[in-house]
Image (cartoon, rainbow, N blue to C red):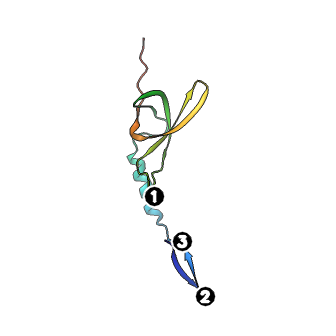
Amino acid sequence: MPDLAERGSQKVATQPRVNHAIIKDLKRRCHLAQKYKTGDIVQLKSGGPKMTVARYNNPSAIDTSPNVWCDWFAGSKHEKACFPEDSIQPAQADKKP
């Protein structure tokens, strides 16, 4: 809820002050807790194509579980989607015949 400040005879809403040091520290902690980094090759635990980690979705107050944006190709078509971090794993090495 915004703070109220008096301006003349009127009360106007003011924006709450943001503590940038706290926000920076929270971002650093979230980054340290990430299992994967940009460029890692992963697969869904249930299988599927190899995918490249593009970025993490920032957790929100509603959804605090980390989500990972991944890119891959289906033939020549570029695909991308966001997956819960717990649903992916490092990609399995290709089996040699």
Which of marks 1 and 2 precedes in the sequence? 2
Which of marks 2 and 3 precedes in the sequence? 2
| Mark pair 2, 1: CA separation | 36 Å
Pick out the residue farthest to the bottom. 9
Circles 3 and 1 in contact, beta carbons < 8 Å: no
- The x, y position of residue 37, in whole percent, is 45, 40
94 to 67, vertically: above or below: above
- The x, y position of residue 13, in whole percent, is 56, 76
Instruction: Identify the image quadrant of the C terminus.
Output: top left
The dot on residue 8 is 2
In this view of the protein, which residue sits in the foreground, 8 or 25? Answer: 8
In this view of the protein, which residue sits in the foreground, 87 or 27? Answer: 87
Q: How many marks?
A: 3
Mark nearest the camera among 3 and 1 is: 3
Circles 3 and 2 in contact, beta carbons < 8 Å: no
Q: Which residue is mark 1?
A: 24
Q: The residue under label 1 is which amino acid type?
A: Lys
Label 3: which secondary element: loop
Label 1: which secondary element: helix
What residue sits 40% from the left and 29% below the top? Answer: 46
| Mark pair 3, 2: CA separation | 18 Å
Instruction: Classify residue 76 as left or right of residue 86.
Output: right
For residue 95, which quarter of the picture?
A: top left
Q: Which residue is mark 3?
A: 15
34 to 61, vertically: above or below: above
50 to 25, vertically: above or below: above
What residue sits 58% from the left and 24% below the top? Answer: 75
What residue sits 56% from the left and 26% below the top? Answer: 74
Q: Residues within 10 Å of mark 1 (few under 14, many from 20)?
A: few
Q: The residue under label 2 is which amino acid type?
A: Gly
| Mark pair 3, 1: CA separation | 19 Å
Label 2: which secondary element: loop
